[in-house]
Image: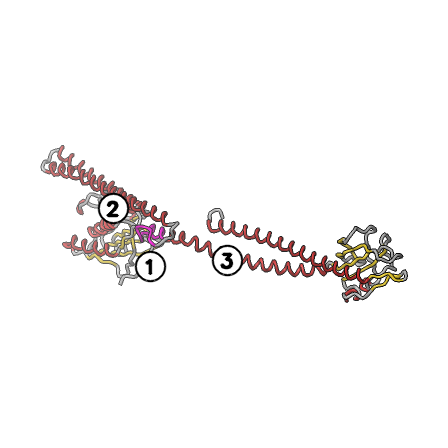
C-alpha cells in the first residue's frame, strides 16, 4: 500500500466512509430508539389517562368503567394495568387487567409525585415499560390510589430491530455505492498518470523522441518540463558526438600528414613515425566508437529499422568484393526489427562483420536477423576456411589480424564488440553451417508492433 497512490487514496477514503457510516448508523439507531420510547411513553400515558377517567369509588368499593383498549382483556397480551392503594404493597385483591391473569405487578412501595416512568418485570421475567400515577378521588372515603399501565418492552424492541436491519442494509448499499464512486473517481483521476506512463514507455522503447498526446491541465507542466529535459539531453548527445568527431578529425589530419611524409622515406625514424601514427589512428577510432556508442545509449527515442541497412550493406559489399565474385545474400525468412540505437553504429558493426566475412568467404556470405527475447540476433555466415575454436576469442583483441594478406588494422572486430557491449549486447564467433565462420551479433530491440516476416 505504501508503494501505490491508488491504494493509499482508496484506503483513506474507505476508512473515512466506513467511520462516517458507522457513526451515522449508531446515531440514527439511537434517535429512533428515543423516538420509539417517547411514542410508547406517550401511548402509555394516554392509556393511563383513560384508566384514570374510568376509576370511580362507589359505596366503599372501587368501580371501573369500560376501557377502549381491548388488549387489556387478552391474557398475557403484553398490555397491563393495575390499581393499588397508595402506600400498601400490591396484593391479589387489587384491581388489575384481565391480561395479567394471576400475576401482580411488583411496584416500588413509594410512588413518585406526578407521572413516573418505571422499568418492571412480570412473573415470567419479561421486561416491562410502565407509567404510574398517584390519584386521589373526590369522595370522602376514597383512599389514595396508584394507577399503573405497563407494556412488554418486546413490543418496542421488535420495531427497533426491524428498523436496525433496514438501516444497516441501506447503509451497506450506500457504502457499496460510495465504494464504486470512489473507485471510478480514482480511475478517472489517475488515468492521466497511466497515459503518462505509456508515453514514457514509448520514449524509452525508442518509439517517440518526446511525450506526445493531450494531458490534463495539472499534468501538462510535468509533461512540458520532461519534454524540455529530453530535448536538452538529445542536444547534449548531438553536441558530444559532434565534438568527438571534430576532435578525431582534427587529430587524424596531422597524423595523416606525418604518415604520408614518413612514407616517402625508408629510415628507422620514418618507420617509427609510420607505426606510431597508425597506432594513434587506431586508438582514436577505437575511443571515438566507444564515445559515440555511450552517447547513443543515453539518448532516447532511438529506433533504427534493420532490414534496409542490411540490404544496403550487402549491395555495397557485393561491389567491394566484386572481383572475387562473392554472393552476399539476405536470408529469405529474415525478420524485420528495430535496433534501439543509432543507425551509424548499426552500419559500423554490421559493416565490419560482413566485410570480414567477405574477405574470407570462397563464394557465399549469408546474413539473417531474428527477434529473440527483446534482442535482435544477427548471424553472418561465410563458406570460408573458418577458424579453430581455441582461436576464436583471440580474434576480437585489438590489433589482431587473422592474416596479413587480407589487409586491415585488426581493429574492426574490437570496435564491433565494444559497440555491442556498450549497447548491452554481445558478439561471438561460432562454426557456420556453410563450413566457415559464423558471427553472432546480439543487440537490444526497440519495443513496438510485432515485426512482419520479410516477403
**Disc 1 vs disc 2: which is toward the camera?**
1
Sequence-wise first label, 2 or 3: 3
Q: Can residue 127 be seen by looking at this rendering?
A: no
Instruction: Give the labeled residue for mark 1.
Output: 450
Please state which of the two labelled residues, at mark 3 or mark 1, is closer to the viewer: 3
Task: Name the residue: 78% across, 59% down.
Answer: 149
Give the SS element for disc 3: helix
In the image, 395 versus 164, the foreground residue is 164
The residue furthest left is 264
Pinpoint residue 177: horizontal percent, then vertical percent: 52, 58
User: Dot 3 surroundings within 10 Å: few (below 14), some, or many (20 or more)?
Assistant: few
Stretch in magenta: 199-213
Image mark for residue 180: 3
Most common secondary structure along the magenta stretch: loop
Q: Nearer the viewer, residue 274 or 343?
A: 343
Measuring from the top left, give residue 444's x and y in whole percent. Answer: 32, 51
Mark identifier at residue 413: 2
Ranked by sequence position, the earlier of labels 3 and 1 is 3
Kindly report the distance in space between the C-alpha atoms of the residues bearing marks 2 and 3: 62 Å
Mark 1 vs mark 2: which is more N-terminal? 2
Q: Residue furthest top?
A: 269
Q: Residue 369, how many percent across, how many down?
A: 28, 56
Element on which disc 2 rests: helix
Does the magenta portion include 211? Answer: yes
Disc 1 versus disc 2: distance between alpha carbons? 31 Å
Amino acid at each position: 500500500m505504501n508503494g501505490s497512490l491508488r491504494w493509499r487514496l482508496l484506503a483513506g477514503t474507505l476508512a473515512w466512509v466506513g467511520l462516517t457510516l458507522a457513526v451515522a448508523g449508531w446515531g440514527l439507531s439511537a434517535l429512533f430508539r428515543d423516538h420509539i420510547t417517547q411514542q410508547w411513553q406517550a401511548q402509555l400515558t394516554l392509556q393511563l389517562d383513560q384508566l384514570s377517567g374510568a376509576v370511580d369509588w362507589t359505596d366503599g368499593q372501587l368501580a371501573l368503567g369500560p376501557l377502549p383498549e381491548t388488549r387489556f382483556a387478552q391474557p398475557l397480551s403484553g398490555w397491563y394495568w393495575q390499581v393499588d392503594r397508595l402506600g400498601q404493597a400490591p396484593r391479589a385483591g387489587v384491581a388489575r387487567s384481565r391480561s395479567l391473569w394471576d400475576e401482580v405487578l411488583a411496584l416500588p412501595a413509594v410512588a413518585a409525585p406526578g407521572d413516573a416512568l418505571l422499568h418492571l418485570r412480570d412473573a415470567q421475567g419479561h421486561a416491562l415499560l410502565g407509567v404510574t400515577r398517584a390519584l386521589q378521588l373526590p369522595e370522602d372515603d376514597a383512599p389514595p390510589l396508584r394507577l399503573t399501565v405497563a407494556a412488554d418492552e418486546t413490543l418496542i424492541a421488535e420495531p427497533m430491530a426491524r428498523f436496525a436491519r433496514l438501516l444497516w442494509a441501506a447503509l451497506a448499499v450506500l457504502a457499496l455505492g460510495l465504494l464504486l464512486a470512489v473507485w471510478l473517481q480514482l480511475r478517472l483521476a489517475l488515468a492521466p498518470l497511466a497515459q503518462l506512463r505509456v508515453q514514457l514507455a514509448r520514449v524509452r522503447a525508442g518509439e517517440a523522441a518526446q511525450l506526445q498526446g493531450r494531458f490534463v491541465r495539472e499534468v501538462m507542466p510535468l509533461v512540458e518540463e520532461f519534454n524540455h529535459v529530453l530535448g536538452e539531453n538529445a542536444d547534449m548527445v548531438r553536441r558530444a558526438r559532434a565534438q568527438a568527431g571534430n576532435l578525431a578529425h582534427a587529430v587524424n589530419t596531422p597524423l595523416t600528414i606525418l604518415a604520408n611524409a614518413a612514407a616517402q622515406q625508408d629510415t628507422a625514424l620514418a618507420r617509427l613515425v609510420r607505426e606510431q601514427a597508425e597506432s594513434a589512428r587506431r586508438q582514436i577510432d577505437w575511443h571515438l566508437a566507444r564515445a559515440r556508442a555511450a552517447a547513443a545509449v543515453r539518448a532516447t527515442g532511438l529506433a533504427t529499422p534493420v532490414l534496409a541497412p542490411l540490404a544496403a550493406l550487402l549491395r555495397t559489399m557485393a561491389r567491394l568484393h566484386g572481383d572475387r565474385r562473392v554472393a552476399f545474400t539476405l536470408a529469405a525468412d529474415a525478420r524485420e526489427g528495430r535496433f534501439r540505437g543509432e543507425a551509424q553504429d548499426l552500419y559500423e558493426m554490421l559493416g565490419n562483420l560482413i566485410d570480414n566475412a567477405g574477405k574470407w568467404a570462397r563464394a557465399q556470405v549469408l546474413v539473417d536477423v531474428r527477434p529473440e527475447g527483446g534482442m535482435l540476433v544477427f548471424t553472418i555466415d561465410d563458406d570460408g576456411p573458418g577458424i579453430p575454436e581455441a582461436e576464436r576469442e583471440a580474434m576480437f583483441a585489438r590489433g589482431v589480424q587473422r592474416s596479413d594478406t587480407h589487409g586491415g588494422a585488426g581493429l574492426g572486430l574490437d570496435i564491433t564488440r565494444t559497440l555491442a557491449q556498450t549497447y548491452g549486447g554481445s558478439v561471438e564467433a561460432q562454426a557456420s553451417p556453410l563450413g566457415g565462420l559464423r558471427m553472432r551479433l546480439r543487440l537490444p530491440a526497440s519495443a513496438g508492433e510485432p515485426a512482419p516476416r520479410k516477403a
